[in-house]
Amino acid sequence: MQRTPARLAAWALLVGSVVATAGYLSAFLANGNGDERFAGSSWIGLYTIALLGDVLVIMGLPALLHVHGERSRRLTLIGYVGVLVPLVILNVGEGTVEGYVKPYFATHGGLLADDVPGLMAFEAPALVILLAGMICLGVAVFRARVLPRWVGVAFLLTPFLGVAGLPGGLALIPDYLLFVALFAVGLHTLRATARDETAIAAAAHAATV
């Protein structure tokens, strides 16, 4: 990936991770953890902010392919898919139901007794991909030795926390952990591209002397 697209992707990761985390946290803090949250006055607005942050993170994921360079390329590519697919299906897809469909039902006769039919079949493959992808990405971090080791640990913990069945707002802890790790990826990418630009500028200056 060229430096300019890499920097744009890194900025998308940085901004998206912060916006998504702030949106989710504020939505649950302001409206509670139970089903009553869907009828909260600020739920839709704050959850919209979180979803916009998710979209920015998705736009910035190519930075994952840049950060390791040619090191652990295949594992990193699998990890990229393991982040992309769950974000699209679980965060944005299921999140649209959480953010807009359930609030509508909550204020128009009450929530459905069961989830939307077929939703679990839509989510299950994403959970499998999340598990495989995060393990590969965590291993890639350890093998490439580019990012701090705690980033690899965060990637490895994310899927296991995701399937732990944490209640209410606690269910988003793996999301927060993933966003922190992706923030670190974006920050490292920005620093790396800045160093590359400095080195290129110094070489060009030396060539003209």
Image: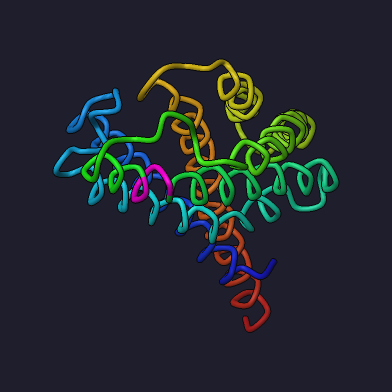
Q: Residue furthest bottom?
A: 208
> Which residue shows up at 63% across the image and 39% down it?
123
Identify the image's colour scheme: rainbow, by chain, secondary structure or one colour. rainbow
Q: In the image shown, does 37 or 129 lie closer to the viewer?
A: 37
- Determine the residue positioned at 49% across, 29% down: 177
> Residue 92 vs residue 132: left or right?
left
Magenta region: 97-101
Please tell me which residue lies in front, 140 or 198.
140
- Residue 111 location, quadrant: top left
- Name the residue rendered at 51%, 66% in the picture: 8
Q: Is residue 168 magenta?
A: no
Residue extending farthest to the front is 109
Q: Quadrant of the C terminus?
A: bottom right
Specify the quadrant that holds the N terminus.
bottom right
Q: Quadrant of residue 103?
A: top left
Q: Residue at x 37, y 22 (%)?
A: 168
Is 38 placed above or below 97 here?
above
Left or right of 101? Residue 32 is: left
Q: Main secondary structure of the magenta part?
A: helix
Q: Nearer the viewer, residue 75 or 124?
A: 124
Would you place residue 37 above or below residue 1 in this image? above
Front residue of 50 and 150: 50
Q: Is residue 56 left or right of residue 61?
A: left
Residue 120 rendering spot, x and y as whole percentages: 62, 36
Q: Horizontal and vertical percent for residue 208?
A: 63, 84
| Percent x, y of residue 4 | 56, 71
The residue furthest left is 41
- Height in image: 101 above or below 6? above
Question: In the rendering, at what x and y percent does residue 115 appear?
Answer: 49, 35
Residue 98 lies within the magenta run? yes
